[in-house]
Amino acid sequence: MKRTTDLLAIYLNDHLAGSAGGLELLRRATRAHPPGAVAQQLHDLVDEVTEDREELIQLMRVLGIAPRRSRVLLGRVGELAGRLKTNGRLLSRSPLSDVLELEAMRLGVEGKACCWRALRALAEVDRRLDPLRLERLLRRADEQAALLETLRMSAASDTFTDGGRAPLQDAR
């Protein structure tokens, strides 16, 4: 059976891999939006998620856990593979791309919040971890999830309705 520290190393490296893929997706989504409010919100989110990723790396160092570059690479490869989704168009973005990407980003942020919660629980028995720092990270993740949900709902409304008023009708 694996030692607890080995399991924690696997867990945190998996989250680090997820953050690499999620950050790539977020950067790509930001570039896909024309200048404006949504692009600025996504750009600000890129900055925050980059900071969160650095926080995770610092917490791993505090715990004596080395980041595994192979896991980070797998996270990036996973994001590339995620581009091979059916969005109604073979080689280009469709309005559905925004909805799917925002859903994926929201799920990633929810996963990050789960990690912060797990580390906060660990902080009760491991003095190397600062529970206040983890609370701050958790609050920020909750704010990020709320923003992504707002953007997702707006994209879904734009994609699946006529300006948010009625479902789109097939013009057959």
Image (cartoon, rainbow, N blue to C red):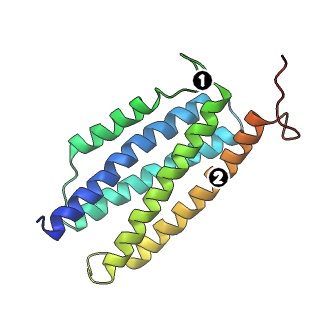
Question: Where residue 112 sits: x, y (%)?
Answer: 43, 58
On the rendered image, what quadrant is the N terminus found in?
bottom left
Q: Secondary structure under badge 2?
A: helix
Question: Where residue 156 sits: x, y (%)?
Answer: 71, 40
Whether residue 82 sits left or right of residue 65 in the image: it is right
The residue under label 2 is 149
Note whether 142 is above or below 49 in the view shown: below
Residue 172 in view, yes or no: yes
Question: Where residue 168 sits: x, y (%)?
Answer: 82, 31
Kind of residue at disc 1: Arg
CB contact under 8 Å: marks 2 and 1: no
Q: Which mark is residue 116?
A: none
Q: From mark 2 to mark 1, how far is it between C-alphas?
A: 20 Å
The residue under label 1 is 93
Q: Secondary structure under badge 1?
A: loop
Note whether 75 is above or below 123 in the view shown: above
Whether residue 114 sits left or right of residue 45 in the image: it is left
Name which residue lies at 32% across and 46% down. Answer: 17
